[in-house]
Amino acid sequence: MRALVLSVATLAFLGCGSSVDVTPWVGSWTASVAQTETCSGSSGSHTDGLTGAIIIAAGPNSGTIITEPANGCDLTWAVSGSSATLTANVTCPTVPASVPGTWAATFTTGLLTLNGSTIGVSDSGSAIFTPTGDPAQNCTFNQSGSFSN
């Protein structure tokens, strides 16, 4: 019921003189991702579909990429071959939820897998859902799906 927008990081250079070509990752992608969240309190467990445009850019450090969704929740990923892992826990700005209220998410794990013109997406974390007029609820979430271009 609450929508998170995925973020993807940019690939760059990996140490010891070897470099990673991030060109296949960088560009405009379309997300098609399912998110399952489980919250304390009355909201229980829900599954939402997350779709929309996402930009992947080269990261600030060599060997990294950044996913840049419309909501500003950018995530940085370390690239190794055809996969990229979330570099650190990231707490995103509070965003409006798909039901009245707000959703503040912290991404704790994530994996991207590049296969031609598709990137497999898998990540998880925790969130605080604050329904309008009700107390905040602790939640966990898992996202899985793909980006395509």
Image (cartoon, rainbow, N blue to C red):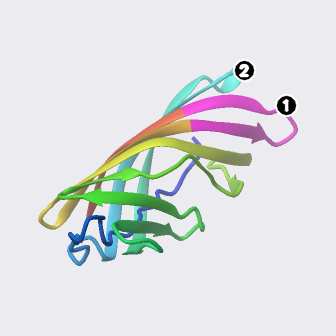
Tell me how far mark 1 sits from mark 2, CA to CA: 9 Å
Give the quarter of the image for residue 35.
top left
**Is there any visible trace of residue 3 in the rendered image?**
yes
Where is residue 125 shown, x and y percent of the image?
53, 37
Q: Give the residue pinned by disc 1.
A: 135
> What span is colored magenta in the figure?
126-140
Q: Give the residue pinned by disc 2.
A: 41
Magenta span main SS: strand
| Amino acid marked by disc 2 | Gly
Q: Residue furthest left?
A: 116
Asked whether the residues under the numbered discs 1 and 2 touch, taking CB atoms below 8 Å apart as contact, a structural biologist would say: yes
Give the quarter of the image for residue 62.
bottom left
In the rendered view, tell whether residue 135 sits above or below residue 64. above
Residue drawn at 30 percent across, 60 percent down: 79
In the rendered view, tell whether residue 80 sits above or below residue 61. above
Give the quarter of the image for residue 12.
bottom left
| Amino acid marked by disc 1 | Pro
**Is there any visible trace of residue 35 in the rendered image?**
no
Where is residue 1 shown, x and y percent of the image?
57, 41
Element type at mark 1: loop
Q: Is residue 87 left or right of residue 23?
A: right
Residue 131 highlighted magenta (yes or no): yes
Residue drawn at 30 percent across, 71 percent down: 13
Give me the disc on residue 110: none
Residue 83 highlighted magenta (yes or no): no
- Tell me the crowding category of disc 2: few under 14, some 14 to 19, or many 20 or more residues within 10 angstroms, Cα based: few
In the image, 86 versus 130, the foreground residue is 86
Residue drawn at 11 percent across, 65 percent down: 116
Q: Residue furthest front?
A: 16
Indicate which disc, 1 or 2, sits on the residue closer to the N terminus. Answer: 2
Element type at mark 2: helix
In the image, 131 versus 123, the foreground residue is 123
